[in-house]
Amino acid sequence: MVKPIRTKTRRRTSGSTLAVRLAGLARNLAFTAFPYVISAVIVGGLLWSVYAYAVHSPTFELREVRVLNAGSLTREQAFRFCELRPGENLIGVDLVNVQQVIKRRHPEYKEVRVRRVLPDRIDVILKRRTPVAQVAFSRYVQIDKDLVVLAGSSPSPFRNLPIIQGSPSPRAGLFVGVRLADPETQRALQLAETVKQSGLLRGHTLTKVDITDPRNISLWADQDIEIRIGGGRLVEERLKLLEQTLKTVQLDRARIKYIDLRFDDVFIGER
């Protein structure tokens, strides 16, 4: 059975009506949005003009670099520190690149922040790494809690820092910024921190952690008293045993030469 012709006409009429409505809606939207488009173009043009002026204006030439927490630097030294040049445009300075340059050249700083100070200055705020121990190689070098080697070394021990004795030299070479990655040195530092945080030595000073033989680790208190704790998984238990021992034994440098915790019974060697 053939469909009535009027059905096709109705469909065409409906499609035409929809197209007309969409076209009208598009015109209305365009008319409504036109002022906003014009405003955006004007604002964009003004911003571009301001940026172009700032980039080429002598007002924003870099005249000063201020480096905080790096000691006293001359003007020339401060510019060299950041690899910047006097007179370059302050707006065009890549602050992220300056930060990366400083971190690469000065790994002794844990944090580096760089900021623009209009119209003509860069401020660099530094946070130094804090030494928590020293490692005995051919010279004594300071390390922070991340085992990063810090600037400065000495043929004799630094005061008030526990010594880690017996660490292997790093394969990458011993220079400022290298991280000591060998597990025994990491363990020695953790051990020193544990002793310090727990107050285990009760007013005495942990002066050295000797890991020359990882199976026979020794702690040294007040420079002269050796505490032999061995190695392996029993170290934590032996620290607890040391705590119990020190409740009844006075750490007297004049009387005690060593305390040996490696066996079932605690041995105390007298001088």
Image (cartoon, grey):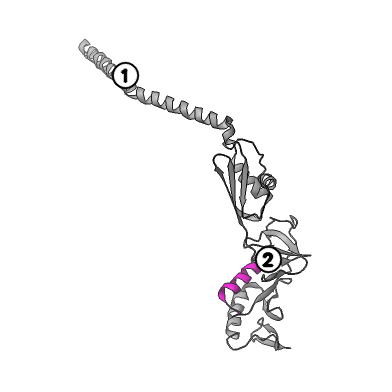
Q: Callout 1, which amino acid?
A: Arg
- Per the image, label 2 sits on a secondary structure element best described as helix
Residue 232 position, x and y percent, is 65, 72
Provide the major secondary structure of the magenta segment. helix
Quadrant where the C terminus is found in the figure: bottom right
Residue type, numbered disc 2: Thr
Q: Locate residue 75, reporting x and y percent.
A: 67, 46
Left or right position of 136 against 17: right
Pick whichever of labels 1 and 2 is earlier in the sequence.
1
Asked if labels 2 and 1 touch by Cβ distance under 8 angstroms, the answer is: no
Query: Magenta includes 198?
Result: yes
Q: Residue at x 71, y 56 (%)?
A: 176
| Residue 52 shown left or right of residue 182 in the figure | left
Residue extent of the magenta highlight: 187-202
Left or right? Give the position of 44 relative to 266: left
Q: Is residue 2 visible?
A: no
Disc tally is: 2
CA distance for labels 1 and 2: 74 Å
Residue identifier under label 2: 185
Q: Quadrant of residue 259?
A: bottom right
Return the residue at label 1: 27
Q: Pick the residue in front: 76 or 127.
A: 76
Other residues around mark 1 within 10 Å, as few (<14) / some (14–19) / many (≥20): few
As displayed, is residue 213 above or below residue 148?
below
Q: Secondary structure at mark 1?
A: helix
Query: What residue is at 64 percent from the left and 77 percent from the top?
Result: 205
Residue nearest the observer in this picture, 141 or 191 = 141
**Quarter placement of the N terminus:** top left
Rendered residue at 31%/19% (across/down): 27
Give the quadrant of residue 37. top left
